[in-house]
């Protein structure tokens, strides 16, 4: 079971809310989120209610300021705990929509997609096993997108604004 504590102010100050499950709308618990503490599990927090808007991956640890999780603002309105997963990880990337064009399968983290896949953009993917985070910039930086097992026929299916995926990593969740 996971646990995250949201704080309205920086450095774990102000009104707080303890959370141990998915919440599609956190607006009634706090008006803004400037810091967070993850006690157990891995979480995806979202800028908007209904699991929409910018996404941020948080693992166990302290985040004294929203910029520590690469946040663009203090707006957090929903969250999901990432299920515990320890077995294997496999993802297939495609250079074009609907699984067309060149394909490459990965089972490990990739800090620089272009060096391995030789494409700057990913337009579809199939998550065969495990949970993954896509990043728009190399070395796990920039906007983040959470992918669970399933088919993503277009980049908008994972919430992407374009096909830019420059790095990705497995979510290894030890509660």
Image (cartoon, helix red, strand yellow):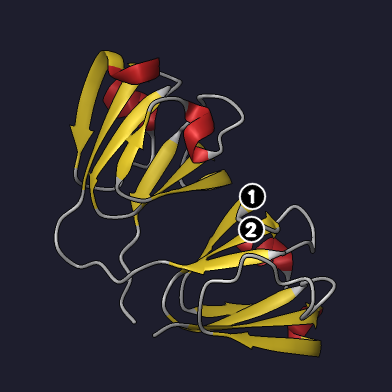
Seen at 28% across and 35% down, the residue is 126
Other residues around mark 1 within 10 Å, as few (<14) / some (14–19) / many (≥20): some
**Residue 68 versus residue 38: which sits nearer the camera?**
38
Seen at 51% across and 84% down, the residue is 20
Say which residue label 1 marks: 52
Tag shown at residue 46: 2
- Label 1: which secondary element: strand
Q: Is residue 61 visible?
A: yes
Percent of width and height locating residue 142: 59, 44
**Left or right, residue 88 beside residue 5:** left
Percent of width and height locating residue 125: 33, 31
* Image position of 174 with respect to 147: above or below: below
Badge 2 vs badge 1, beta-carbon distance below 8 Å: yes
Q: How many marks?
A: 2
Q: CA distance from mark 2 to mark 1?
A: 6 Å
Percent of width and height locating residue 132: 36, 50
């Amino acid at each position: 079971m996971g646990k995250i504590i949201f704080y309205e102010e920086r450095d774990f100050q102000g009104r707080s809310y303890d959370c141990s499950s998915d919440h599609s709308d956190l607006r009634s618990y706090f008006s803004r989120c400037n810091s967070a503490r993850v006690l157990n599990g891995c979480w995806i927090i979202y800028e908007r209610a209904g699991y929409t808007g910018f996404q941020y991956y948080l693992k166990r640890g302290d985040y004294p300021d929203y910029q520590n999780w690469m946040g663009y603002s203090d707006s957090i309105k929903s969250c999901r705990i990432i299920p515990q997963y320890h077995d294997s990880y496999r993802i297939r990337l495609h250079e074009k929509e609907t699984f067309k064009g060149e394909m490459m399968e990965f089972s490990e983290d990739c800090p620089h997609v272009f060096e391995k896949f030789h494409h700057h953009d990913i337009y579809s993917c199939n998550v065969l096993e495990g949970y993954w985070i896509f990043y728009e910039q190399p070395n796990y930086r920039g906007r983040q997108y959470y992918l669970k097992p399933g088919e993503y026929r277009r980049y908008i299916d994972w919430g992407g604004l374009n096909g830019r995926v420059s790095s990705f990593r497995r979510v290894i969740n030890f509660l």
